Amino acid sequence: MPIDVPPGTVTVFAAASLSAAFQELARTFEAQHPGVKVDLAFGGSSTLVQQIQQGAPADVFASADEANMQRLVESGAIAGVPALFAHNRLQIVVGLGNPKHIAGLADLAKPGLTIALCGPTVPCGGYTAEVFRMAGLATPQASQELDVKAVLSKVVLGDADAGVVYVTDVRAAGTAVVGVDIPQEANVIARYPIAAVKNAPHAPAAAAFIAFVLSAEGQQKLTRFGFLAR
């Protein structure tokens, strides 16, 4: 049963990899709570943390890793205890038809390729570095993008031959790209926490939105976008 929430706008800062899923969640939440609008702001988790710390009026923060959420917890910017709501995996993304015949992580080091990766301060960048470490490979020379959507965009536009993104990003891109699996023993499980921001402008809606994300309905929607159960 949806929680009764006063009308107004709830502002949700969310990791870029959540874009498609959270847009769907927001539509359903708004339909269940007439008069409530969900304002979504997506970006690299580290960038969103900086914005919240600088006073951006966010009600909810959903991160693609626990480290960036912990930064806000330690600075006193989070109300309550963050809750894990989803997991994800990484995948190599290449152009349609895989014209460079990339079959695995080792191929990303081949000469002549243009590779796009997330920067090291972004969750997908940290996860990517861990994947190459577990595979016993050096991280290849690559661009350092601000978020996972920028990596995906470079591959879609043909500005990069390949990149490393989340499985959910490849799925959301549809037929524009192809995903190349990373072996399970070299892959990581990305952990996504969510929490209300301290002194949230619309605290009741923040609590209700988080409850919806954690609910059976919210979890079902996330799995449809390729996220793993929490």
Image: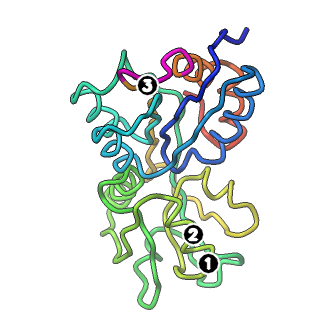
Front-lying residue, 106 or 219: 219
- Which residue is located at x 52 percent, y 36 percent? 87
Tell me the distance, in whole angstroms, between the alpha carbons under discs 3 and 2. Answer: 28 Å
Residue type indicated by callout 2: Ser
Residue density around tag 1, few if under 14, some if 14–19, many if 20 or more, within 10 Å: few
- Which residue is located at x 35 percent, y 35 percent? 66
- Which residue is located at x 53 percent, y 28 percent? 85
Residue type indicated by callout 3: Ala
Residue under label 1, please give it: 157
Residue 149: x percent and y percent? 53, 60
> Does residue 201 sit above or below 134 in this rendering?
above
Residue density around tag 3, few if under 14, some if 14–19, many if 20 or more, within 10 Å: many
Residue 95: x percent and y percent? 64, 76
State which tag comes first along the sequence, 3 or 1: 1
Residue type indicated by callout 1: Leu
Residue 115: x percent and y percent? 45, 77
- Looking at the rendered image, the quarter that the C terminus falls into is top right
- The image's mark for residue 153 is 2
Q: Give the range drawn in magenta.
A: 198-205
Residue under label 3, please give it: 195
Q: Classify residue 10 by image quadrant.
A: top right
> Does residue 34 sit above or below 179 in this rendering?
above
Residue 195: x percent and y percent? 43, 25
CB contact under 8 Å: marks 1 and 2 = yes
Q: Does the magenta stretch include residue 187?
A: no
Q: Is mark 1 on a helix, strand or loop?
A: helix
